[in-house]
Image: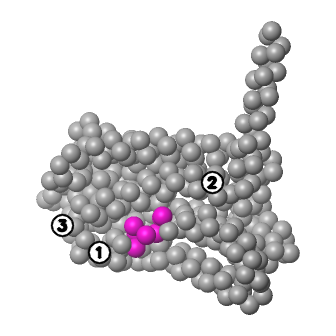
């Protein structure tokens, strides 16, 4: 951050507080039960995403470009949940609302990076489905491991740079009065509004951020499926169309689960109650990571077959060891 500050200006002193206070939900009865619920969601998320990653690693049949994106989504879900939920539990269940200035910015960077990467991973999966349905004969040529790795790496670089700029702009703010963050984590919008100097660059970024990280990916995904539907209507029978579209159901479920709370929050903006906004965003942070592996296991035939095969192999090994001991 020193490099960022020196690039933007020299001999400028900024007032940085020693800590921030995360207030969370205010005036909600029995709110601790909500945080207990988040903990159980987190446990399921860790188990599910770890299982998906393990299955993809253990089964050579799943080492395809599509499952590179699925593995990356599971990794981001696991990393993001592990960065967010334990800290939320510590803050609200164990009453440790104080967080140091540097830890808060690190917390913000990691949470926003993982949330954004979930969005772009859905873009990668939608492009995979688009090519698989529209150009099935050219799929293996168009969607290669190199192409998928390159696309995912570019998403990582873009998101990391964008969030580095976000955090860098916050370091250019002075905090002279309140240090109370009305959110469940170090939320960018809540932090820059506390500044007592010019926060216009952060305000502009806050307007551009949802467009770049959520609206554009969502538009691309919707356009992809619109193109798929239009093509299938023209060239496929009803049965062929339903069979082809069935391969997209799992991905569409992930898109709906991830983007619906964000659309509600960013569409209503100031009209939504602060507590409702916090609940909406917190559920967006923890529910998709929990449901993603469940949906992929239930909706994707390859993963179901792989899980059955791995369990069958493990069961045979157990029986063989038991027989040998006898």
Establish if 201 lies above or below 237.
Answer: above
Q: Which mark is residue 269?
A: 1
Nearer to us in this view, 130 or 302: 302
Nearer to us in this view, 205 or 305: 305
* In the displayed structure image, the side of residue 137 where residue 246 appears, left or right: left
Give the crowd class for mark 2: few <14, some 14-19, many >=20 residues within 10 Å: few
Callout 3: SS: loop
Of label 3 and label 1, which has the lower sequence position?
3
Establish if 243 lies above or below 39.
Answer: below
Q: Is residue 224 visible?
A: yes
Outermost residue, top side? 326
Residue highlighted by disc 3: 196
Q: Residue at x 41, y 41 (%)?
A: 40
* In the displayed structure image, the side of residue 87 where residue 162 appears, left or right: right
Considering the image in quadrants, where does the N terminus appear? bottom left
Of label 1 and label 2, which has the lower sequence position?
1
Q: Is residue 262 magenta?
A: yes
Q: Residue at x 77, y 45 (%)?
A: 59
C-alpha separation, residue under disc 3 versus residue under disc 1? 23 Å
Percent of width and height locating residue 83? 44, 46
Q: Residue at x 67, y 42 (%)?
A: 54
Callout 1: SS: helix
* In the displayed structure image, the side of residue 274 where residue 217 appears, left or right: right
Q: Residue at x 80, y 28 (%)?
A: 316
Percent of width and height locating residue 233? 70, 87
Q: Is residue 172 visible?
A: no
Percent of width and height locating residue 321? 79, 18
Q: Is residue 112 magenta?
A: no
Q: Which mark is residue 64?
A: none
C-alpha separation, residue under disc 3 versus residue under disc 2? 51 Å
């Amino acid at each position: 951050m020193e490099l960022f500050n020196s690039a933007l200006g020299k001999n400028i002193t900024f007032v940085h507080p020693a800590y921030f206070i995360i207030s969370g939900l205010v005036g909600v009865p029995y709110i601790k039960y909500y945080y207990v619920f988040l903990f159980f969601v987190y446990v399921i998320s860790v188990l599910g995403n770890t299982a998906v990653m393990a299955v993809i690693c253990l089964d050579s049949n799943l080492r395809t470009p599509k499952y590179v994106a699925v593995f990356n989504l599971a990794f981001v879900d696991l990393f993001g949940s592990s960065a967010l939920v334990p800290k939320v539990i510590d803050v609200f269940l164990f009453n440790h609302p104080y967080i140091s200035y540097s830890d808060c910015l690190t917390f913000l960077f990691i949470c926003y990076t993982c949330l954004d990467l979930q969005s772009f991973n859905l873009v990668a999966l939608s492009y995979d489905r688009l090519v698989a349905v529209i150009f099935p004969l050219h799929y293996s040529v168009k969607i290669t491991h190199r192409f998928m790795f390159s696309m995912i790496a570019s998403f990582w670089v873009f998101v990391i740079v964008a969030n580095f700029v976000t955090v860098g702009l916050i370091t250019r703010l002075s905090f002279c009065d309140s240090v109370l963050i009305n959110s469940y984590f170090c939320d960018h919008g809540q932090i820059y509004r506390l500044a007592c100097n010019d926060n216009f660059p952060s305000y502009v970024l806050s307007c551009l951020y949802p467009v770049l990280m959520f609206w554009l990916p969502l538009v691309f995904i919707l356009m992809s499926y619109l193109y798929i539907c239009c093509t299938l209507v023209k060239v496929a029978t009803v049965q062929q169309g339903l069979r082809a579209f069935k391969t997209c159901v799992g991905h569409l479920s992930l898109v709906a689960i991830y983007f619906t709370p964000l659309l509600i929050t960013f569409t209503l903006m100031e009209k939504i109650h602060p507590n409702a906004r916090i609940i909406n965003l917190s559920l967006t942070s923890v529910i998709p990571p929990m449901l993603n592996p469940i949906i992929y296991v239930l909706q994707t035939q390859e993963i179901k077959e792989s899980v059955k095969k791995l369990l069958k192999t493990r069961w045979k090994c157990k029986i063989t060891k038991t027989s040998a001991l006898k």
